Image: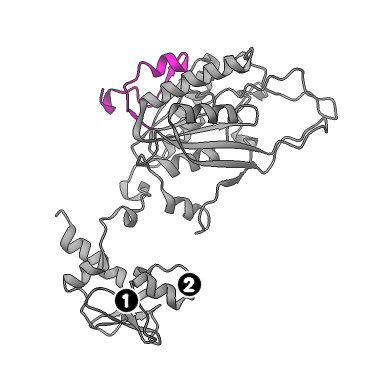
């Protein structure tokens, strides 16, 4: 079955395992799963003012034993792994009630953990009885289909979202509230609706425009809402008709901006570009033996290019462009491509990374 034949951008009603088994193997790029947490709440909860807390009491979150929950978990995780592409990844979210059981089963099935991400809730619900710490976080497991599998990770997009700093594995985001919280007759339409900001990071980090995102526990449709905004295809599976109606209404109201590949492409093109070594530039004549390079666009630190591709510094140190830079930075890591500069015909200093880009264009371009 081709992508065109898949039930794209649709909510498929029914049990997730049964529906997943109707889909072809290796057909989806990303899975986000928000399964039942098996909270097993023994009684109603009340605030200090005696108003009732709207917890999770639905039948879909009830299991008679851990063994029953584990069997359920193993079944849907196996079904998800079958439809996930070899290059795809899966995100599973849970609380202390279930995430450790899920994690163990995932490893037993062959999934390979990439990260556990902690969603730190900036506005968590307090512990009204005062007998435990406030539950202020949930855990997401991010995994590939198998050890060593290639997968999508838009590292620089995440870095950009984080103020040009490497995105950490603790995400401070508010819970779903206010206008974003879907309500029917003044009550929550879904007890565990996830915030769109959380799904935005998940989908942007681990998929590309045009990819297929599947959610086997679709609920109120947050995954579909965000996928549509980011021009990803989506497939939702949901067995509760009341949630299907809520999700359809939410998603139909989303009017994404027109698709422009250059705008919506967040891939790290530099990291994905063909590898080019410093010696290749030397052999091809883009740099010359004996040529002077300058460190950090300043002319006080110079190095001469040796015929074998090493740099020789004025203090006698010899090494690669990275080793020579690290030497000048007193042992700190150094990307030599960005820190060593050459003098162009106009007398201006330019990073040798510009020569690498030119080499790719002139010597490695398929055109």
**Viewer-nearest of discs 1 and 2:** 2
On-image quarter of the C terminus = bottom left
Closer to us: 123 or 110: 110
Q: Which residue is mark 2?
A: 331
Left or right of residue 59: residue 342: left
Q: Residues within 10 Å of mark 2 (few under 14, many from 20)?
A: few
On-image quarter of the N terminus = top left
Closer to us: 363 or 201: 363
Give percent across and percent down for residue 208: 36, 42
What residue lies at 23% left-to-right and 74% top-to-bottom? 308
Where residue 211 sits, quadrant-wise, is: top left
Instruction: Report if residue 94 is visible in the image.
Output: yes
| Picture layout, residue 312 above or below residue 99 | below
| Picture layout, residue 312 above or below residue 18 | below
For numbered disc 1, what is the local secondary structure?
Answer: strand
Closer to us: 170 or 282: 282
Q: How are the colours assigned in the image?
A: one colour
Give percent across and percent down for residue 52: 78, 23
Q: Find out whether residue 4 is within the magenta segment.
A: yes
Q: Which residue is mark 1?
A: 350
Q: Which mark is residue 112?
A: none
| Picture layout, residue 37 above or below residue 316 | above
Give percent across and percent down for residue 235: 40, 26
Q: CA distance from mark 1 to mark 2?
A: 24 Å
Which range is magenta?
1-29
Closer to us: 27 or 311: 311
């Amino acid at each position: 079955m081709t992508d065109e034949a898949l039930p794209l951008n649709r909510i498929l009603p029914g049990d997730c395992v049964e529906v997943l088994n109707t889909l072809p193997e290796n057909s989806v790029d990303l899975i986000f799963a928000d399964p039942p947490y098996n909270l097993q709440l023994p009684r109603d909860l009340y605030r200090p003012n005696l108003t009732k807390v709207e917890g999770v009491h639905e039948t879909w979150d009830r299991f008679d034993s851990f063994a029953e929950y584990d069997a359920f978990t193993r079944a849907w995780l196996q079904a998800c792994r079958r439809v996930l592409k070899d290059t795809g990844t899966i995100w599973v979210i849970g609380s202390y009630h279930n995430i450790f059981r899920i994690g163990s089963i995932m490893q037993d099935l062959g999934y390979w953990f990439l990260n556990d991400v902690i969603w730190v809730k900036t506005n968590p619900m307090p512990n009204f009885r005062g007998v435990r710490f406030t539950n202020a976080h949930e855990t997401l497991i991010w995994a590939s289909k198998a050890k060593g599998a290639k997968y999508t990770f838009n590292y620089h997009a995440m870095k950009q979202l984080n103020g040009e700093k490497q995105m950490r594995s603790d995400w401070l985001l508010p819970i779903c509230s206010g206008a974003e919280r879907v309500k029917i007759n003044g009550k929550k339409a879904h007890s565990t609706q996830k915030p769109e900001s959380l799904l935005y990071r998940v989908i942007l980090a681990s998929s590309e425009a045009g990819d297929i995102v599947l959610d086997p526990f679709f609920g109120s449709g947050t995954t579909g809402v965000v996928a549509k905004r980011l021009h990803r295809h989506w497939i939702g599976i949901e067995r509760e008709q009341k949630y299907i109606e809520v999700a359809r209404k939410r998603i139909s109201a989303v009017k994404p901006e027109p698709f422009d590949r250059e705008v919506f492409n967040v891939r790290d093109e530099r990291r994905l570009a063909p590898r080019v070594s410093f010696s290749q530039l030397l052999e091809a004549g883009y740099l010359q033996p004996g040529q002077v390079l300058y460190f950090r666009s300043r002319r006080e630190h110079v190095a001469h290019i040796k015929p074998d591709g090493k740099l020789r510094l004025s203090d006698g140190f010899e090494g690669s462009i990275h080793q020579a830079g690290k030497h000048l930075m007193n042992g700190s890591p150094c990307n030599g491509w960005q820190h060593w500069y050459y003098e162009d015909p106009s007398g201006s200093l330019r990073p040798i990374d510009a020569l690498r880009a030119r080499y790719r264009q002139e010597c490695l371009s398929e055109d």
